[in-house]
Amino acid sequence: MASSSSDKVDTISNLWHARLGHVNYARMQDMTKMSLIPGFDMRINKCHTCKLTKITRKPFKYIKRDSRVLDLIHSDLCDLHSTPSLGNKKYVITFIDDASRFCYVYLLHAKDESLDKFKVYKQEVELHQSGLIKHFRTDRGGEYYDPVYFQSTGIIHQTTTPYTPQQNGVAERKNRTLKEMVNSMLSYSGLSEGLWGEAMLTACYLLNRIPNKKTKVTPYELWYKKVPNLHHVRVWGCRAVVRLTTPKMKTLGERGIDCIFIGYVEHSSVYRFYVIEPNDYVSIHSIIESRDADFGNEDRFSSIPRFKDIP
């Protein structure tokens, strides 16, 4: 359900609130002090979308973090029980570094892909960080059951006591925050639930660039040893005109196509777009990547075909 027209992006604070996936205003104040986003008069009120999609929860007890990156990785598998995402993905798995809280998200077709995704994650982060994962903490789900693998790598696989998800609280809280952000982004944009996978990847991208409540430092900075640049951030689900690539561009005629902005390409300044209008160059309902786009006023566009109409 889309939020009311009174929630229109009509102030700078509301615009950045929408760009950052409806993160709470206290985190935005921290980001202003850190010069990650522009300074402006900020109304400390939940937007209408946040009121519809977020509920108040009691705070969790703070637990001291491991001091070094890769010493401990938390993971949790989540079934959203919703419409399959683009590509028919049904599950989300998260990997969170304890020291930095930097998070990776992968979309899965089935639960039994979990261990393979961990192996992909392990190879990437150990190469990037020039280190080794020491401990891996999960619940007792069978998707990770392969004692021979963990023994061969030297990783200590820690599992929670039955019926005590609090022991894997870091992953549980991260998944809760991701789901709340995805819910807000979908509700605000008015887009189909079938795009939840793209929203989830975007939510993870944004949360890695938002400062932690206690440390006032972004996971990105702790992970990459540099401050993130947020000048490229746009409102998820807004309409955009994307410039056609040169081989597909004719001398005469239109040079752009109508799309919906659905995310970012990690490690680059490239955006991801969902094609919404028929044209002679790119198939409708396809996903394209480009750095050349006109986002206009970043207005949401909710009249695209629903997921059930997508082939």
Image (cartoon, rainbow, N blue to C red):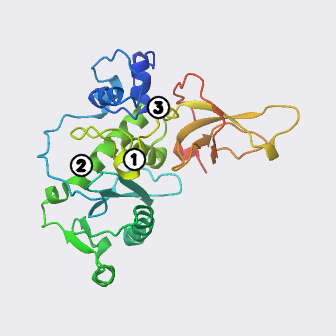
Mark 3: few/some/many CA within 10 Å (<14, 14-19, 20+): many
Q: Is residue 130 left or right of residue 256?
A: left
Dot 2 or dot 3: first in sequence order is 2
The residue at which mark 3 appears reads as 189
Q: Amino acid at mark 2?
A: Arg
**In the image, residue 120 above or below residue 4:** below
Q: Is residue 301 left or right of residue 223?
A: right
The x, y position of residue 110, in whole percent, is 41, 66
Q: CA distance from mark 1 to mark 3?
A: 18 Å
The residue at which mark 1 appears reads as 204
Give the SS element for disc 1.
helix
Q: CA distance from mark 1 to mark 2?
A: 13 Å
Q: Amino acid at mark 1?
A: Cys
Q: Amino acid at mark 3?
A: Ser
Dot 1 or dot 2: first in sequence order is 2
The residue at which mark 2 appears reads as 173
